Structures are given as C-alpha cells and as structure tokens.
Amino acid sequence: MTLNWKPTDDIFELKKIDCELLRSKHIKLEKIIDTRNVDMKELIGANKENPARSLQVTTKSDVVDFIHSNLVKVFKEMYLDFDNQNADYSLTGEIKEFYAEENPGYAGSLTMQMTLKKANKIVWTGLITGSSKRTGRSYSLDNYMETLSDAIMDFAKQFAENKSLYEKLK
C-alpha cells in the first residue's frame, strides 16, 4: 500500500492553539529517524477483528519522508515555520511507533522521541504521542490512511501544547 495524506481532522482546530512562543523561536524540523523494529519497518497496521486471522497492512513507501513532510505541512498550517533554513533551533525525532490497528474500530498512533537543540546543545527532549480513533468499513485502506494521517495531526497538536517544552523555551 502507498502512504497517502488523508486527514479527516479539521486543521482549523489546530490553528486555534496558542503557540506564539514556538512562533517566536526559529526552529527547523531536521532529521527524523525510524527506530522501530528493523524487521517490521514496512508494517504500519493490522486488522485484528478475527482473532484467528490477523491481516497485516504494509507499505513500501518511505515512512520517514511521509511523517516528516506532513508534519512540516501541518506545522505550516499552524503558522509555525519548521522548514526555516536560518533557524536558531534544530528539532529531531526518533519514530518509536507508527501504526493503525482495526479491532473493530480504527486506532492509530505516532510516537516519537523529540529533541530540540540550540547550537548543538540539547535544550529539551520529550516523548510525544499523537493518536486517533475512528470507525469505518472493515479493512479499508482509506480508513488506515485517515487514521494514520489524523495521528500525525494529533502529534503536531501534542507537540505544540507540550508544557515541558514551553518551560525550556521561556
């Protein structure tokens, strides 16, 4: 399956988040690395409605690129320029989980260990999880894409509202 950006969550809700402090800092979302199990990097979901027969959902798409490009897109929608070439801060992430499970509804999550540096010195680090839940037709590739896309949107929200990050940036 090819990863396709297909959010159902309303971006307007993310624009309401007060992230003025983040806007005032010049941050670039640098590299994201995939630290999930090497043998399972293509696995992005499963249908577990039938306990006797789990159906896997896999992709040949570049998961890192999909997450990175869509996070930058969502942050831009939130008026955060995380693609700034002249940034004062660099933000990196390690993907711990990117997965959607159907049993019987859809539940998706994106968990990453995020690190913010200024002049190569760690300013903040935190584990952030974005999640999503939805219902839909069984074993629907569209529903998997919507669930994973909404998890990325929620991840951006959780990051932008992270109190420990704000404490370090003050």
Image (cartoon, rainbow, N blue to C red):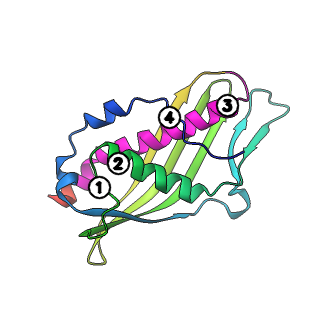
Q: Do the residues labelled 3 and 2 touch (CB within 8 Å)?
A: no
Q: Earlier in the sequence, mark 1 or mark 3?
A: 1
Relative to 84, 99 lies left or right: right
Give me the disc on residue 75.
2
Q: Residue 1: image x %, image y %? A: 72, 45
Give me the disc on residue 81.
1
Q: Tag 2's secondary structure?
A: helix
Viewer-closest of 20 and 5: 5
User: Which range of residues does the magenta coloring cover?
Assistant: 137-166
Question: Residues under labels 3 and 2: Cα distance?
Answer: 28 Å
Q: Do the residues labelled 1 and 2 touch (CB within 8 Å)?
A: yes
Q: Earlier in the sequence, mark 3 or mark 2?
A: 2
Question: Residues under labels 1 and 3: Cα distance?
Answer: 34 Å
Question: Residues under labels 1 and 2: Cα distance?
Answer: 7 Å
Relative to 64, 42 lies left or right: right
Q: How crowded is mark 1: few (under 14 residues within 10 Å), some or many (20 or more)?
A: many
Q: Earlier in the sequence, mark 4 or mark 1?
A: 4
Quarter of the picture containing the C terminus is bottom left
Viewer-closest of 161 and 26: 26
- Which residue in the structure is indicated by mark 3? 102
Q: Residue 142: image x %, image y %? A: 64, 32
3 vs 2, front mark: 2
Q: Tag 3's secondary structure?
A: strand
Give me the disc on residue 45.
none
What residue lies at 28% left-to-right and 62% top-to-bottom?
A: 27
